[in-house]
Image: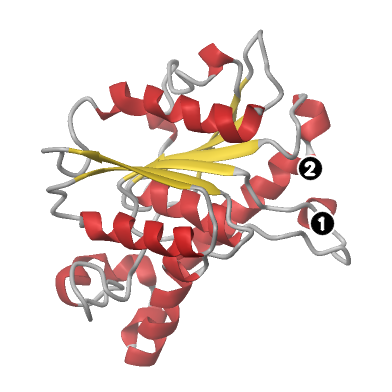
Amino acid sequence: MYAFIPENANGAAIIKMVSGGWKSSHDRVKENYSKPYTDHGYTVFAVVHGSQPRHKVRDIMGYMHRAGRLIRYNATQWKIDPNRIGVTGASAGGHLSLILATKGRPGDPDSEDPIDRASSAVQAAVVFHPPTEYRNCAEPGDMAVGVGKQARWQPAFGPESETAEGRETLGRAMSSIYQISESTASVSIIHGDPDPIVPLFQAESFGKIANERGVPFKLVVKEGAKHGWTGRADDEHQFLPWFEKYLLC
């Protein structure tokens, strides 16, 4: 994990998931990786996780909770407010971000490890084209956990994906859409309408349930943009108003 601390720190923090296809690399964390957030006073934590296929997706989701707990536990050291933490990422990084937004939970007060006593919850999430539903991925009934159109990703899901029962359990656990509750963090998604890898309806479906649960939600549809469109980093400034609204106000 890398910490980027601005001189004009505003007390809020952004967790940035260094992930694509559930693969992560230190090489992706460049000098300007924390922009535009540090320019506006946010302390940024770039989280590099263990990559698949050595590390399975279910394990990687657990690592994200550990990262959130670690950051909150050390909030005083980092001079951040533990109640003003946001998260962002794209594609698989967006998926992991929404796992924290929907499944972030209080820590275990009985744990011997003080870090595990801290909460992994975040207060806001803004992401690019995240997978939100693995049981009906491209169309109803499209189970996207190592079979069918997603068979090439099977090593990422591990032995649990080798049976129909296991795929059902894993698919539900991986799908943030099933975890939305009244306590879910505010969420905004930017998604291209012709995305051939993660269909736009996944973001729309997430938003529908979020609205039903009373969760603040906003979907920005980028016309003509496919998955991981060129110049996507230039669109990241659009995340700032959302974080300002839910982390600074």
Residue lying furthest top:
7
N-terminal of the pair, mark 2 or mark 1, is 2
Q: Is residue 198 visible to the viewer in this orientation of the structure?
A: no
Q: Secondary structure at mark 2?
A: helix
Q: Is residue 246 visible to the viewer in this orientation of the structure?
A: yes
Dividing the image into 4 quarters, which one contains the C terminus?
top right
Residue 80 figure quarter? top right
Q: Secondary structure at mark 1?
A: helix
Residue 168 figure quarter? bottom left
- Density class for disc 1 (Cα within 10 Å; few <14, some 14-19, many ≥20) is some
Q: What colour scheme has been applied to the protein in the rendered image?
A: secondary structure
Q: Residue at x 44, y 33 (%)?
A: 26
Q: Position of residue 235 (x, y in %)?
A: 31, 26
* Amino acid under disc 2: Tyr
Is the Cβ of the residue at disc 2 closer than 8 Å to that at disc 1?
A: yes
Q: Which mark is residue 73?
A: 2
How far is the residue under mark 2 from the one under mark 1?
8 Å
Dividing the image into 4 quarters, which one contains the N terminus?
top right
Vertical side of 211 occupied by 30: above or below? above
Residue 127 figure quarter? top left
Q: Position of residue 150 (x, y in %)?
A: 21, 68
Q: Which mark is residue 117?
A: 1
* Amino acid under disc 1: Arg
Q: Residue at x 74, y 41 (%)?
A: 72
